[in-house]
Image (cartoon, rainbow, N blue to C red):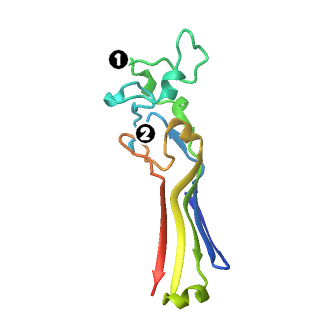
Amino acid sequence: MTGFSLDLGWKGIDLSLLLQGGFGRDVALTGVYSTGVMSHTSMTKPFYGNGNSPVYLVENSWTEQHRNAEFPRLSVTPASGNNAYSSTFWYRNGNYLRLKNLQLGYTLPNKTIKAMGIDGVRIYIEGQNILTFSQLTKYGIDPEQPGVSNGYYPQQRVINAGLKLTF
């Protein structure tokens, strides 16, 4: 994982951003535990753990009518657990670049606010996890997730606005 930060200011306007990325990593849709064992996930088996499978899995799985599918035939029976066998088929490119943090602000000039008895006024808007560029997002996977995505919630996009007054 690598990061890049930038802080700029000009005539009362300030901009701060943090880009973060990871390169050279593959992610298994099946999930890989730290012991190296691969396991089913909702990405590879319908109704795994009594949950719903993603639409892309159901729509892009092999059937008699859809022989050029991206994924193999789906099965919900325990005896046919072939979809979780260790295979490079289930690996996807895990490279990503994420705009992790962005803040844009404006500080009012002192001559404008001194007459009101205020030392400083800054208005800003900021956000976390604004954009993510990754092939994994089409599968609904957060590229920063651990090796096995059982119960992992992706990082939320957060937008805040603020006003800072200094007296």
For label 1, the SS is loop
* Above or below, comparing residue 104 to residue 122 in the picture: above
How many residues crowd around disc 1 within 10 Å: few (fewer than 14), some, or many (20 or more)? few
Q: Nearer the viewer, residue 157 or 124?
A: 124
Residue 146 placement (x, y as % from top left)? 43, 47
Residue type at the position of mark 1: Thr
* Above or below, comparing residue 63 to residue 130 in the picture: above
Q: Nearer the viewer, residue 45 or 128?
A: 128
Residue type at the position of mark 2: Val
Which marked residue is nearer to the observer: mark 2 or mark 1? 1
Residue 115 placement (x, y as % from top left)? 54, 90
Q: Which residue is mark 2?
A: 32
Quarter of the figure with the C terminus: bottom left
Q: Going 58% across and 20% down the picture, which residue do you hit?
A: 69
Q: Earlier in the sequence, mark 2 or mark 1?
A: 2
User: Quarter of the image holding residue 15?
Assistant: bottom right
